[in-house]
Image (tube, grey):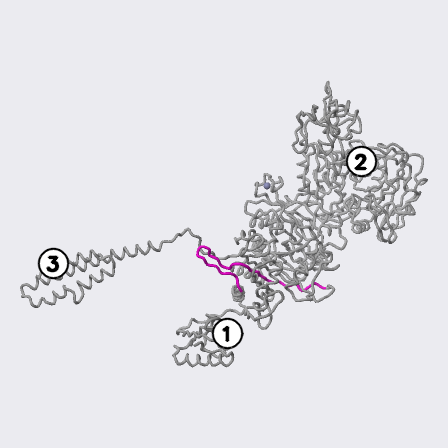
Amino acid sequence: MQERLQELQDEAVKQVADADTLQELEEVRVRYLGKKGPITEVMKSMGRLSKEERPAVGAKANEVRGRVQELIEEKEQTLREAAVTKQLEEERIDVTLPGRPVSKGAGHPLTSVVETIEDVFTGMGFQVAEGPEVETDYYNFESLNLPKHHPARDMQDTFFVTSDLLLRTQTSPVQTRTMEQHEGKGPVKIICPGKVYRRDEDDATHSHQFMQIEGLVVDEGIRMSDLKGIFEAFVKSYFGEDREIRLRPSFFPFTEPSAELDISCAMCGGSGCRTCKGTGWIEVLGSGMVHPNVLRMGGFDPEKYSGFAFGMGVERFAMLKYGIDDIRHFYTNDTRFLEQFTRV
Amino acid sequence: MLISYQWLKEYIQLDDLTPEEAAEKLTLHGVEVDAVHHKGEDITNLVTGRVVSCAQHPDADKLSLCQVDVGEADPVQIVCGAPNVAEGQDVAVARVGGRLPGGMKIKRAKLRGQVSEGMICSLQELGWEGKVVPKKYSEGIFVFPEPVVPGMDAKPLLGLDDTILELDLTPNRSDCLSMLGTAYEMAAVLDREVKLPDPQIVPSAEETAAYIRVDVQSPAANPYYGALMLRDLQVGESPLWLQTSLMAAGVRPLNNIVDITNYVLLEYGQPLHAFDYDQFGSEKVVVRQAQEGETMTTLDGEERTLNAHHLVITNGTKPTAIAGVMGGSDAEVEDATTNVLLEAAYFDPGVVRYAQRDLGIRSDSSIRFEKGVDPNRTAEAGRRAASLMKQLAGGEILAEPSEHDTLHRQPLELDVSLARINRALGTSLTIEEVSAILKRLQFPAEQTDEDLLAVTVPTRRQDIAIEPDIVEEVARLYGYDNIPVTLPNTPATQGGLSLEQKKKRQVRRFLESCGLHEAVSYSLTTEEKEAPLVPENRLRVPVALPMSEDRSSLRTTLVPHLLDALSHNKNRSRQHVSLFEIGSVFFTEEEEITRQPDERTYAAGAMMGLWEEHAWQGEKKPVDFFVLKGVLEGLAAELQIDAVFEAAERPGLHPGRTAVIKNGGRIIGTAGQLHPDTAAAWSLPETYVFELDLQYLLEQQAEVMKYVPIPRYPAVDRDIALVVDTHVSAADMKQVIEEAGGDLLDSASVFDVYEGEHVEAGKKSVAFTLKYLDRGRTLTEEDVTAVHENILAALNKQTGAVLRG
Ligand SMILES: [Zn+2]
């Protein structure tokens, strides 16, 4: 019987070795270790053996069974690994192929500039005020110290709708509207972004429609030095810590003193280049202390209150920031242009 | 204003500054210098020469063979193509090895076999703009009007060693439209003296009144008119210094008399006018309002029709000049002129401004008068011109000019408070410092109190009217750079965006996240462009004088310009484009506009081509109505707004693929496919558009969100496929289901729609998934079946739907 067991073991070893798939291996397992398999048969027939023979045959049978079991498990492990390896090999993909595009639209660069500037100023305690694009002569001009026939009206060629209604030439009318809402009481701290219109022929640097952001601070004791402080904070926050500012005398009918704000040129660091026309400085906005007539017309007492105002061109900021050379790009909506402005 | 640095030096010492340094100081403290031009900086080896002989080139009709004395032992031969070259002329010669503007290098050359050693130059070749070159020399070489020694450096003689400061003047600084004004400004900036001209006249015994008298009939418009009379003048070419001074300022020399009036205009900022006395044809200057419809021909050859608002200078019968704007062609000073009537007048700025606008003329005179010239310099400018005329054209100046004089010349006095200056600027200036600055400006000031200065404003500064004007003067001369840097002492303010502004940003972000690019387009458009997409007879807001036909009125919809943008992109081979825009549209109810229009913020979008594409996986999903609707439903969800889509017909849109979007019964927008005709009009493929009254959406207050507990018991799903008439809408069916489903029905959603084979014609199959849920217990089969049967019965009764067998 022991020989028979040894034979069975040798047979099983061979068949395990020959099994190429898990399926075949399972068949081998059932064949040799199953309830009806030869080893079980041997063990069942042990009753016929003598007491003396039984332990040795039983031990042998268990040994063979254990051995075969072990071999099958080893083989199973090997086959499983091979199967996984094969599957993984079959599932191999080219990871360099393009991914599935997630469609994401781009924000318009003018909106990006407006929102960034809004964020800088709201962080400094400003609110955002808006006003109509079709304005009255009063708000667009007269309340800003530009009476009818004032020569400075020529600075801004106007689209009139009627003799009294016009497309606003600046966002400044929002100043007066906001001051009126405050009913003579400070503080007023606003910026006003929006579209404005002037009778300009469209070319690389002119557009009959463009965007401005106006700013206004009115309270007791506002000084020109405060305007410098706000500008320094704004410029460093928007353009970068290393930018210097400079104020130059200028003229706007609604401010006095008036000043033009220059920032040091980023291209050359101030030594002079083509971008800054060799001056080392780039003009970024117009500003000044609010003219007493403007305060008065907004319902504020110029004896008690003072303020400063400023206005900047959004296109100019975008052109400086992104190096855009033609203002018409902003209004053509060419996707080859728009797509480049993913939000930052 | 173009300022010749050399000319400026006649009034102020500037030898220790480079023009760049002076320009920078002026820019930082006074008026902006836009550019500094060094005349002739790229010219080398330019000398004076005399044409010793001039002969026809043997082999070329249009060339001359000149022997030119350039100050050396032997003359050089130069082949010259100018028609005006002649023997005996003194000319400017660019010698071999020299350079001319534009990098042109002069080489020894052979022209049609003849050696040419240099070039006889025209003024244009020397860098002068054609429009300032005297007519006489505009078609040929320049010839020195006075003899010069050959071989000298020609650049200084021609003003080509000068530097020009180009001032960018703001409208308030018209005082700097003159050399003297600029000199005062420079003097204030640099703290220096101004040297003023001192015109001296030695008149003849004869009195002006014997020749000309002045009758001003509109003294308000013309408070001062001075008529000077000069006799026996010799009109001719001006000396070179005068010509180069004018050219440097951008003015073309004409003859000595006209040149002098222009010279004094530039020097004093006071326009003058010289008439040929004999052509003027009367002994009386009558200044009056023009008659309605009166005509005259101005110097530029244009016939002008006048009205009663115009002020004219007449000889008593007909106008000879439009006051302060332009002279007439009848009494021009020409070479034959011998007697000159010289006008030095003060015209009211408003009158000149009107004429300038009405006639569309902006002359060197009018731009000065319209801002207000210095009333204290008018008569002096006349004397200055007369004395120069006598000096350069001979003749005599008659005694006692004829005048009308009601001119106010009193300077303004202003009280200026030191405390207010410091309060406005954030500085701590002393009264001495402020006084020193006013002294630099040559504004006489007197301390009248501890804190007060009485400041006299010179009449040359017409821009200064109130105390803050003085504050500005002090600030700029003190230096904006010296003003400290502070932050406002205001109480802390709550900055930030309003809820609507925040939501507007949210809308942008959402639409971008859906794959739409933000567009910005023009607000001005035309009725024709909008016509296909808006209801007929919609009233519009036109602009009064449009610059062009295609920008003649304000938009009432954002869609057409978005379609333009799609079309633009398609023409550049961009087939798959989705854009949105947020902007104002303008409505009116008035035929004749009298009030501000109703301006509303709209949002619109336009989409064409593929919505999704993954090329190498072969997936393509074109934009269709449901893509569009998905975006809008998402947006409504983002804003927590109910949006119900109802089939509708709208101008320019596909009648079967268009919906209006409603919120609580109010139409808040439209979405649909462009009608094929509309698409064709823009050359677009299948295109989908939407437009929303965004302003309304932003104004809606969303309810505060409340948490609903996660259900503890399982839901039961039942799918049903129903066959109904094709015209029954999914929304109608859903409504029936929801009504019949009661509390146990949690949701109903369409998962399949089918028409075609196996479904009767005129019918469609619509499949719903119904989700049943009881939050309090586990539903039994019986519970669900009862409600489900109820729903099926209701569907059958109300929509005719039957379960698909
Ligand atoms: Zn630079």
Is the Cβ of the residue at disc 2 closer than 8 Å to that at disc 3? no
Depicted B531 relative to depicted B795: above or below: above
Report crowding for label 3: few under 14, some 14 to 19, many 20 or more residues within 10 A (C-alpha). some
Residue range of the region highlighted in magenta in the rendering: B595-624
Distance between the Cα atoms at labels 2 and 1? Answer: 104 Å
Label 1 belongs to which residue? B761
User: Mark 3: which amino acid?
Assistant: Gln
- Specify the quadrant of the image occupied by residue B245: top right
Is the Cβ of the residue at disc 2 closer than 8 Å to that at disc 1? no
Mark 2 vs mark 1: in front: 1
- Do marks 3 and 1 share a subunit? no
Q: Which circle marks residue B197 in the picture?
A: 2
Distance between the Cα atoms at labels 3 and 1? Answer: 78 Å
Does residue B272 appear anywhere in the picture? yes
Q: Secondary structure at mark 1?
A: loop
Label 3 belongs to which residue? A6
Where's residue B537, x and y in %?
69, 66
Find out whether residue B601 is within the magenta segment.
yes
Main SS class of the magenta portion in the image:
strand
Going from the N terminus, do you reach mark 2 or mark 1 first?
A: 2
Q: Secondary structure at mark 3?
A: helix
Q: Chain of mark 2?
A: B
Mark 2 vs mark 3: in front: 3
Q: Chain of mark 1?
A: B
Report crowding for label 2: few under 14, some 14 to 19, many 20 or more residues within 10 A (C-alpha). some
Where's residue B26, x and y in %?
69, 40
Does residue B423 appear anywhere in the picture? no
Residue B210 relative to residue B105: left or right: right
- Do marks 2 and 3 share a subunit? no
Find out whether residue B391 is within the magenta segment.
no
